[in-house]
Each structure stands twice: as structure tokens, then as C-alpha cells.
Image (tube, helix red, strand yellow):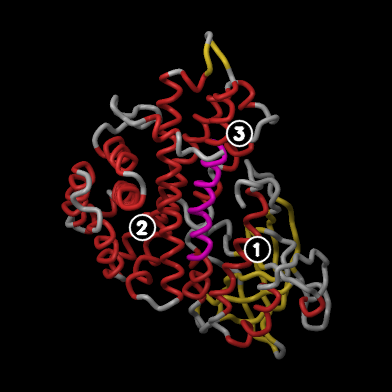
Amino acid sequence: LTQAEPGFCCPVTMTHAAMPALRHSPSLHERWSPGLLHWDYDPRALPAERKTALTFGMAMTEKQGGSDVRANTTQATPVADGWRLNGHKWFCSAPMSDAFLTLAQTDDGLGCFLVPRFTPDGERNAIELQRLKDKCGNRANASAEIEYRDAWAEPLGEPGRGVATILSMVQQTRLDAATAPVAMMRQALSEAWRHVRARHAFGRCLAEQPLMRTLLADMALEVEAGVALTLRTARAFDGAARGDAHETALARLLPALAKYWHNKRAPGFLAEAMECLGGIGYVEESPLARLYREAPVNSIWEGSGNVICLDVLRVFGRHPEALTALRQELDAARGASSALDTAMQELVTRLEAPPDTLERQARWLTQRLAQCLQGALLLRHAPAEIGETFCRSRFIDVSPVFGTLPADAPEAAILNRIQP
């Protein structure tokens, strides 16, 4: 879906991600979930009960808090028919949504609330759109700065447990934020591959020139590794929904690993793809400029890089079974590649460091855990030469840029796996 148009994926993501949060309040889940699950899209500005399909948004960020949502100052006051919210939200995505999940302070602490677009009496709720954001990219998706002015709301989840409640939504959106950069990389690779097979320079086709082939083969490896980690993460969510303990443990950890690493790889990858097209890649006639502008957003949304890496450490501390489950996944590929075996041994050593050292190294650990799992997945599920080349290029012959594969890399075999 991202390869069609990344912009409208945000409302789709928030809508399906609202479901886990709604389950914290059975009455709200029963009332709202049928509209959320409807296949249709109903853009009309009407009360929810008069629409065929519903969409949800999210409004957590405040300008003084950012990722530190416990610093939020929006206040929620109980009234006879519900709650009233007053406060400012610096970022509210998809402000045309039928309802929003938001955080506000109560006497019990920070609570989670459902704020509908219309009040129960059919009036527009007091949600003032102060302005639409002029963003670097993601321009097909409206993002607003809003003010709650005695806005009517219903509590969601336990009192004072707003962060825990809304994190069930955030965890689901992180899966999509990990998937989207891989989709953009895949689209960019397809555009570049199509271009170099048709373009001739210096007397021959670009796709036949050694340096271009090495670059694109390296990029193709990155896409394949990203797809493998994305789908393994999604499978963990499916297993968690079925009550599988191993998959539940993985589902706590893999979204953070995949979101962090895929989004760190995407901007440089898209810049390389743009270079493959040359000048035409830099102008708006091709999709590369749009994809390049889009690249940073999924890294920032639902936790920027540092926040995600600290979350990984928190998962290790609170849910040690997640690290155990990850080690089992890695052990399944042990012995298939000496490069991966060496990388995993270094991981084991680094993970034994004291807490203050682990925090300073949290980015390295998150990156290496993601790459090791990518390598293990490719060794298990892709042709051996694909997995081995990935492991050698990411753990032994390491370069900060694409296009530096080992001299004996099976480039033809890798390039043959690029799908148009």
C-alpha cells in the first residue's frame, strides 16, 4: 500500500491500530469497532452512528513534552455526561477522523480518552484546528495543531493508566512504521532497476556496467532483508493474537528493532536510488523526490531513534523472555554463516555490560540485533548465497554506503531476484 501512496497510510494505520486500545473498554469497543472494521470509506462529516465506516486519529504530542508524554498539560475534568478536555496538542494526524485517542491529566494521573468528532447530542465537538502543518513530506496526509476547548470525551482504559492504554495502539502503529520504509526502498529499487535496464551511457546499458550492478545488488539485499524482518515481525503479532508465548515475547521487541533499523537505512537508500536515475530522479517527474522527502517521517513518528533504542532496553529489563525468544530465533541459524556466528558472539558479550554502558551503546545494540535477525532469516528462508552475502557484507566487509559488496558476491543471482 505504501508503494501506491505513503500519504494515506497514516489514517489507515491509526484506524486499525485503535482496535487494541479500544479493547481496554468493552463498551467503547462494542460501539466503535463495527465502523472501524467496515471495508468502505465514508468521508462525510457526520456523527458516528450515521456513518457506514469510521476512521480514527491520534493526538498525543504537546510542544513542551514531545516524546515525554507524562509532561502533558491537557486537563480532563469529569462532568455529568462524561469528561471535558482543555489543552493544546501540537500534533494531531488526520484531523478529519471520526474520533481521536488522546492523553490528558486527571486526579488519578495521565488518562487516555476517546474524543469524538461529534458530541452525543450531534454537535461538532470543541476541537479547534489552529493550523495545518507544512511538513517536509507526507503532504497527502493532513496533520494539524489543535486546541481542546471544553471538548467532550469518554475515558478509555483504567484511570491513570493512559500511557499503558495508548501504548497498545502505538505498538501496532510501530509495526506499520517499520514496514513503510521497506516498501519505499522496494519501490525506489524497482524504479532504479527499470531505469538502468533502459538507459545507455558510455556505449552500453547501465545495467551491464559493473559498478552499477554492484550498487543495485547491494540495495536489493537490503530490500530482501527488510522484507524478511517486516514479515517476521508481522507473524509475531499474529502469533501473539493466538496466545503463543514465544511469538508474544517477540512481538514486544521486534517492532522496535525493525522500526529503528529500517528507518535508518531508508534515507541513504533512497538517495542512492535517486542517483541511479541522475537528474530525472531529482525532479518531480519521478517518484524519487517524493519518496526521499517521505523517508524521515516514520523514524520520527511513534518514537524517534533514541526513544526506540531506550524502549529496547526497557523491554530487556521488564520482559527478559523477549531476549530469550530472540536468541532462539538467532540460534536457529547458528552454524550457517561464520560471519553471523561471530556477530552473535559479540552481541552476547556486549549485552553483559552494566546498565550505564548499555544505554550509551543502545543504538549499536539495536542496529546489530536487527541486522543479526535479518541475516538469520535470510539464511533460513532465502538461497544460501543470498544469506551468506548479506552476512559477509554487514558483519565483515562493512561499509557505511551501499555498493561495496565482496568481490566474489553472486551479483547476478541477487539481481535476478529483483521484482518489477
User: Badge 2 is on which residue?
Assistant: 310
Identity of the amino acid at label 2? Answer: Leu
Mark 3 is surrounded, within 10 Å at the Cα level, by few (under 14), some (14 to 19) or many (20 or more) other residues, namely many
Question: x, y percentage for residue 204?
Answer: 52, 13
- First reached walking from the N terminus: tag 2 or tag 1: 1
User: Badge 3 is on which residue?
Assistant: 288
Identity of the amino acid at label 3? Answer: Leu
Residue placed most toward the observer, 345 or 77: 345
What residue is drawn where x is 22% and y is 48%? 336
Mark 1 is surrounded, within 10 Å at the Cα level, by few (under 14), some (14 to 19) or many (20 or more) other residues, namely many
Residue placed most toward the observer, 51 or 47: 51
* Secondary element at tag 2: helix
From the image, give the main secondary structure of the stretch colored magenta: helix
Question: x, y percentage for residue 173?
Answer: 53, 62
Residue placed most toward the observer, 176 or 155: 176
Q: Residue 172 colored magenta?
A: yes
Residue placed most toward the observer, 159 or 226: 226
- First reached walking from the N terminus: tag 3 or tag 2: 3
User: Badge 1 is on which residue?
Assistant: 88
* Secondary element at tag 3: helix
Question: x, y percentage for residue 260?
Answer: 42, 50
Query: Which residues, given as a range, are shown in magenta?
Result: 171-188
- First reached walking from the N terminus: tag 1 or tag 3: 1
* Secondary element at tag 1: strand
Q: Is residue 416 left or right of residue 78?
A: left
What residue is drawn where x is 45% and y is 39%? 417
Q: Residue 276 colored magenta?
A: no
Identity of the amino acid at label 1? Answer: His
Q: Is residue 312 left or right of residue 175?
A: left
Q: Is residue 54 left or right of residue 417?
A: right
